[in-house]
Image (tube, rainbow, N blue to C red):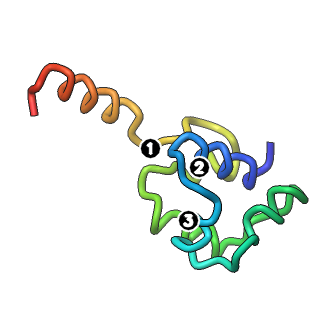
Amino acid sequence: MKAIERISEYLNFKIITPHKFEQTVKLSNGYFQKQLRNKGSIGSDILIKIAENYNDLNIIWVLTGEGVMLKYPAKIIEIQEHKQYNIY
């Protein structure tokens, strides 16, 4: 799986539209879908913008596929459990 496909997986997980992603990262309209369709690569300048705007995304996972998608998956589960029991 290429980095562009992992980014797509993240967007699907977070329920972020490609258009919203392009706006946030300041890409031209349709850029992401075109890269995904052609299984293109993502440049370092775009990866930096992604890392700046999507703090929970593990960029090492995007690049290599190793590790987990989210930087703090245990923390997210912990927060969800606390909300469930009205601890917050």
Locate residue 66, reporting x and y percent.
65, 38
Q: CA distance from mark 3 to mark 1?
A: 21 Å
Q: Nearer the viewer, mark 3 or mark 2?
A: 3
- Rendered residue at 39%/39% (across/down): 72
Whole-angstrom CA distance, mark 1 to mark 2, is 15 Å
Which residue is the site of mark 3? 20
Amino acid beneath label 3: Lys
Q: Which residue is mark 2?
A: 11
The residue under label 1 is 71
Query: At numbered mark 2, what does the secondary structure look like: helix, strand or loop?
Result: helix
Q: Position of residue 19 (x, y in %)?
A: 62, 66
Q: CA distance from mark 3 to mark 2?
A: 10 Å
Residue at the outermost right position: 38
Q: Amino acid at mark 2?
A: Leu
Residue beneath the point at 21% across and 22% down: 84
Query: Residue flagged by tag 1: what amino acid is it?
Result: Lys
Q: Are marks 1 and 2 in contact (CB under 8 Å)?
A: no
